[in-house]
Image (cartoon, helix red, strand yellow):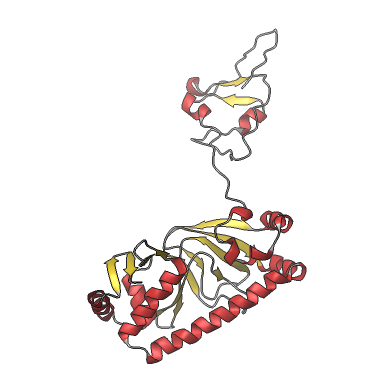
Amino acid sequence: MTHSFSRGPSLRRSTPMRSPRRAEWHIRFSPPRAPDSDAICRPIGGFSPRRYVLGRWSMGSSDQRAGACAAEKRPASCDLCAVRERSICADLGPRELAQIEKTMARRTVAKSHALMEEGSPNDSLYIIVQGSFRLTKHLEDGRRQVTGFLFPGDFMGVRATPASAYTAEALEDSRVCHFPHKFLDTITVDFPGVKDRLIARGQTEYHKAQDHIVLLGKKTAEERVESFLYMVARSIGRNTEDDATEAPLPMPRQDIADYLGLRLETLSRTLALLKKKGSIRDLERHRVTLAG
């Protein structure tokens, strides 16, 4: 920061002085340099850079002054998004993406916090960029049913009813892109590809619901668990060098049991059986390795 002082007394104490430790001084100086384009200024320790603009500097520690503008990387732009090809943005060009970035918001959802609640207004679409979510419905007597899991690239909040049909809770610290439905109404007119992807998403959810009905109604416990593990592996798994598939399991065992309509003890026995048979190579609390 560059200070320019007048010929007269460069510093004069404000009156009245409130405290010897917190004296305020009027200083003439050039405005502070704007932060870099990839940084965001924010107050630290109660010290606000705004006081410089007003021409007043509240005396503080050197650490406070040095840290008044903390560098913080801005969220990656849409063209660098890891899930862009699986989202509604896949068919948009650079100009359209720039327009979307002005309207959408990026949100961070802490673990165990709800992004949507059953019965709340369904006025926005969310695309999961990082993390995972559990979808649940609650009965009048308080019982809960896990109805699904969502992973990066999945949508939630597709407009079908005015109120949310489920509660979406983060299984881990997660990030989402948030699109108001009013904005989607506009871009679906200008960009039919976005509308096509929303329709395709609805069809996918319908097929998943049909598969889940078959799973609960006809499959054995072993078939249910095996189907679930391969579903997770297809969504967020990765292939290993020895042709196996490794996948994280961010959800607790009780959630898996609820989703599959099994008792927790039955799930544990079935996992042990699949490992003994060789279908599961390795099983940890939050990770599984499946045979190729």
Q: Is residue 132 visible?
A: yes
The spot of residue 202 in percent (x, y) is: 59, 79
Residue at x 63% of width, y 28% of height? 52
Image coordinates of residue 230 in percent, x first then y, are 40, 75
* Residue occupying image coordinates x 63% and y 25%: 56
Specify the quadrant that holds the C terminus: bottom left
Quadrant in which the N terminus appears: top right
Q: Residue at x 52, y 27 (%)?
A: 65
Label count reads 0
Q: Position of 73 compared to 31: left or right?
A: left
Q: Quadrant of residue 255?
A: bottom left
Q: Is residue 158 left or right of residue 239?
A: right
Front-most of 164 and 232? 232
Residue 244: give x, y in percent of width and height: 35, 67
Q: Is 100 situated left or right of 278 in this image? A: right
Asked if residue 61 shows in the view, the reply is no
Q: Residue at x 71, y 59 (%)?
A: 93
In the depicted view, which residue is nearer to us: 287 or 104? 287
Please, which residue is most extreme toward the front here?
Answer: 242
Query: Image height check: is 204 above or below 115?
Result: below
| Image x and y of residue 277, in percent | 24, 78
Q: Residue furthest top?
A: 7
Image-quadrant location for residue 224: bottom left
